[in-house]
Image (cartoon, grey):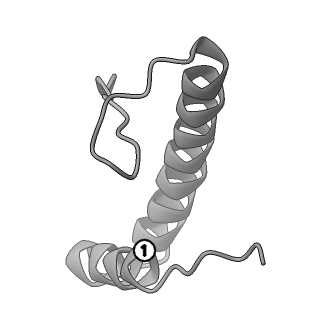
Amino acid sequence: MKINLDWKDKKNKAINCDEKLKVLNENFEEIKNVTQSAYDDAILMGCNDNDFKSKLILLIKNLKFSYK
């Protein structure tokens, strides 16, 4: 699955810097791959797919900026 991503800055303007876009897209691809692998494992171990997805959503909703 290929997702077309348009990245926005804090002012909701498009990010156009090639290097930033490269990092953002690589990070997203890595997250997608790890998440898919974890989802596949969960299903193979008998987890309810909607329960697993709801936990991922909860995880994302509770992310906090970690740099100070």
Residue identified by numbered label 1 = 60
2 shown above or below 13: above
The answer to which of 23 and 1 lies nearer the viewer is 23
Residue 46 located left or right of residue 45: left
Outermost residue, front direction?
11
The answer to which of 50 and 11 lies nearer the viewer is 11
Residue 29 located left or right of residue 5: right
Q: How many marks?
A: 1
Please name the amino acid that badge 1 sits on: Ile
For the point 56% across and 49% down, the residue is 31
| x and y percentages locating residue 6 in the rendered image | 31, 28
Outermost residue, top direction?
18
29 shown above or below 2: below
Q: Secondary structure at mark 1?
A: helix
| x and y percentages locating residue 23 in the rendered image | 66, 30
In the picture, residue 60 is in which quadrant? bottom left
| x and y percentages locating residue 39 in the rendered image | 45, 62
The quarter of the picture where the N terminus appears is top left
For the point 27% across and 72% down, the residue is 49
The quarter of the picture where the C terminus appears is bottom right
25 shown above or below 47: above
29 shown above or below 21: below
Outermost residue, right direction?
68
For the point 37% across and 80% down, the residue is 61
How packed mark 1 is, by other alpha carbons closer than 10 Å (few <14, some 14-19, many 20 or more), is: few
Residue 8 located left or right of residue 15: left
For the point 45% across and 81% down, the residue is 59
The answer to which of 19 and 61 lies nearer the viewer is 19
